Image (cartoon, helix red, strand yellow):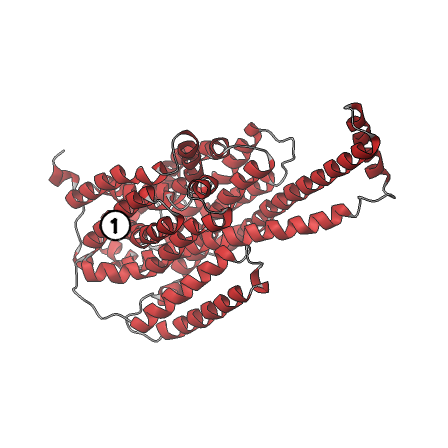
Amino acid sequence: MTMEEASKNPYLIAVVVSMAAFMEVLDTTITNVSLTHIAGNLAASQDESTWVLTSYLVANGIVLPLSGWLAGVMGRKTFFMVCIGGFTVASFACGMATSLPMLIVFRLIQGLAGGGLQPMQQSIVMDSFPPDKRGAAFAITGMTMIVAPVLGPTLGGLITDNYSWRWIFFMNVPVGALALFLVGRLVSDTIHSKAKGLLSIDYIGLSLVALGLGAFQVILDKGQEDDWFASNFIITVAVIATVCLTAAVIWILRQKDPIIDLALLKTRSFGLACLMVFFVGFSLYGCSTLLPLLLQSQFGYDATTAGMVLSPGGLALIFLMPVVGKLTNRIQARYLISFGMVVLSVGMWATSHFTPQTDYNTFVFFRIVQVVGLPFLFIPSSTMAFSKIPPEKSSKASALYSLMRNLGGSIGISILLSYVSRREQTHQTMLAAHLSNTDPVYQRALAHATNTMMGLGQPHAEAAKTAAGHMYRMLLDQSAILSYTDAFLLVACITGALALVALTMPSNKVGKKLPPAAEAAAVH
């Protein structure tokens, strides 16, 4: 195949642009299991190391809604290549960082550069395929959106335990270089995606969005740590976020060429698809954060083993993506989305039934059931979202769609971690009520533990004290485990309700290729 022929092959283009976006999405979760190692190596506390995640997400969230405008100024292909190059260089710099502040700065740059990769990937793929083939196309791009964050903790754990956390970032360099070369040779701009020069920009809207999203992300990432609104800092940031985002919405809706085209949400197929992908991000990122934390804190798994629990689910997704892509061209998207939500809900409900005796294989099974519904959510949602979006709006639509997924992920992580913490306190209070001299079950367990300690040679008084401490430790462990089961059950309830909402989505054309005239109408 010549380079000219390759440049006309839409499937090859989809793979090439997805290679770049895969790196960026992978980096949203790959550091989750490595924060302890990073903190120790750079002489920082565990709390301080969380800014490695925060800085990246803040920068990423700010650039996402701006990517459509930047693509219009520079041209979509040029902007995409600038993002790849910047992300690759920033990744190398992250790996070379010698202090936590240095790493945070480079992660900020990495997030800024990577923010445009997802929407541009989706926009390029959408323009490379006719409407009736987009189901299969989004099956390829879905690898970046779903498989990458699922495999992130697994890959991060393997690299961290066997090499160094620095290779989490160094591995992006050869992939980025290859992607940059292939995009330069294979991808071309369409008429509506060519550079339009230095366009006018809504500086007021840009400032309000950037400041509002940045403040909102800080609340999400630092709220639980600072006890939410018991902190004056969080209250101040919350006021800033609320004022800026409210003003941004009012301002943007009055502009002819807004920085974020919120009017796209009025298109029912796009608006409901954004709602669905928001909760895909909520569930995917939230539970991909919860499960490794649970396994490391309560079951004693190391980073590699905790990550490996997630890997079989990722393999299942790789096989399911093409299948669902074909089904999308034959079955109404709303039915597939509803089915996906039901499967996801069942998976979360099953996971909520783990116990302290649950073994590795059972956790792997729970995770597989959790994620097998995701292709039925992402691919049909993406297909429906862009079914009535005109080509000239594709970049802004992709930016808004990706932003909704990322916001869902950020909010999901924050809400679920906070929910676990609050429920743990509730369960501790409830269980502590039974640790009394009047509770016969507790007294029998305490006497048994005391006798065991005395059998090991401890005096009665010391054995009783040790036994009481052991019982309290069991209380804390049980409280933590119960709080995690509550969190998975909460996600099960949310996704179960959304299965019904999905049935109200508009129908889409399936089953046959549209003639050229109808293809043009389909995107309007």
- From the top left corner, tell me how far across and down residue 361 is, in percent: 55, 28
Picture quadrant of residue 171: top left
Q: Nearer the viewer, residue 398 or 5?
A: 398
Q: Quadrant of the N terminus?
A: top left
| In front of the other: 315 or 166 | 166
Residue at image point 70% right, 39% down = 473
Q: How many marks?
A: 1
In this rendering, position of residue 428 left or right of residue 492: right
452 to the left or right of 8:
right
Tell me, yes or no, if residue 310 can be seen here. yes
Residue visible at 38% across and 36% down in the picture: 323
Eyeballing the image, is 514 above or below 470? below
- In-image side of 212 versus 438 (left or right): left
Of residues 427 and 126, the one nearer the viewer is 427
> At which x and y percent is residue 311?
45, 33
- Amino acid at the residue labelled 1: Gly
SS class of the residue under badge 1?
A: helix
Instruction: Determine whether, in the image, residue 149 is placed left or right of residue 255.
Output: right
Locate the C terminus by quadrant.
bottom left
Residue picked out by circle 1: 86
List x then y, in percent, for residue 331. 41, 44
User: For the point 77% across and 38% down, which residue is it?
Assistant: 468
For the question of whether residue 508 can be seen, the reply is no
Q: Position of residue 166 (x, y in %)?
A: 36, 38
